[in-house]
Image: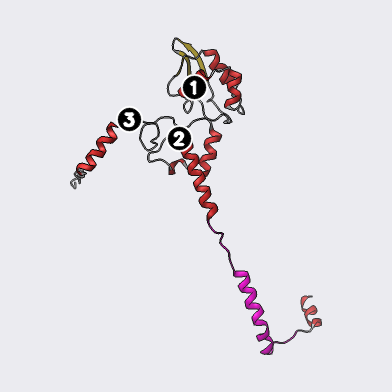
Amino acid sequence: MPEALTLAEPELGPAGAAYERFLREAPETGDDYLRTDARVRFEPHDDDVLLAPLGLSVSESTAGAVLAGGTLPRAVVVPGVPRERVAAFLAALDGSATLARARISGGLEPDAERALLKAAFGVALFAPHAVTALERAVSASELVRFPGSPYEIERNYWANMAAVRRASASSKPASTTHTGASTRSRSSTSSPSSAKTGARSIDPRAASCGAA
């Protein structure tokens, strides 16, 4: 069996070591989408249609409402928000309700809404239409270094990249073809030469007989 090849780690030098130390010690600011941590950064807008997975249930706990079931890998606690408020919000999500409409139906105060979205959005609540619209403009895989959920990408960043893509596409000059013009030009210039070479004229009566 051939011996496995092992490569020594590259020597980065003092500058490289200092940069690695900076990355390890730098606090998470929430603006770096190239890190490997799986965290929701996509923010919902009032006009987004929100959806929840089928089978999602809401229960009460001393910490607040608890979302479980459906496709959730684990229970999600919404701290400080009563179960009935979260249940009313979820009941309003009929497939066409926006965040603004569900907020009114659920009677959510601003603090309760922030707590619910912080805990559940991108995990138990989703805005698939908004994500799909951005995905059609620029694929999420083109924006991140490590694959993950599209909700891990900051929405403003994604929208800006989509705008750049559209502007770049619209600024490209339209390609034109001159095949037809060239053909007409060749045919028009060849007609006189054909007459000069003694091209025979066809008797209309003979042509009609041939067509028959």
Residue occupying image coordinates x 44% and y 12%: 63
Residue occupying image coordinates x 52% and y 21%: 113
Task: Report the amino acid beneath label 1.
Answer: Arg
Q: Position of residue 138 (x, y in %)?
A: 49, 44
Query: Which residue does the numbered mark 3 point to in the structure image?
Result: 27
Mark nearest the camera among 3 and 2 is: 3
Answer whether residue 69 is visible to the viewer in this image: no
Q: Position of residue 43 (x, y in %)?
A: 49, 30
Total numbered labels: 3
Viewer-closest of 23 and 69: 23
Q: Position of residue 174 (x, y in %)?
A: 56, 59
Q: Give the dominant element type of the magenta stretch: helix, strand or loop.
A: helix
Mark 1 and mark 3: Cα distance apart in space: 23 Å
Answer whether residue 36 is visible to the viewer in this image: yes
Task: Report the amino acid beneath label 3.
Answer: Pro
Viewer-closest of 13 and 85: 13
Query: Which residue does the numbered mark 1 point to in the structure image?
Result: 114
Horizontally, is 176 left or right of 144 in the view?
Answer: right
Q: Secondary structure at mark 3?
A: loop
Q: Secondary structure at mark 2?
A: loop
User: Which is nearer the N-term, disc 2 or disc 1?
Assistant: 1
Task: Report the amino acid beneath label 2.
Answer: Glu
Magenta residues, start to end: 172-201
Query: Which residue does the numbered mark 2 point to in the structure image?
Result: 154
The reply to whether the C-beta atoms of the residues labelled 2 and 1 are less than 8 Å apart is no
Classify 140 as above or below 118.
Answer: below
User: Which is nearer the N-term, disc 1 or disc 3?
Assistant: 3
Mark 2 and mark 1: Cα distance apart in space: 17 Å
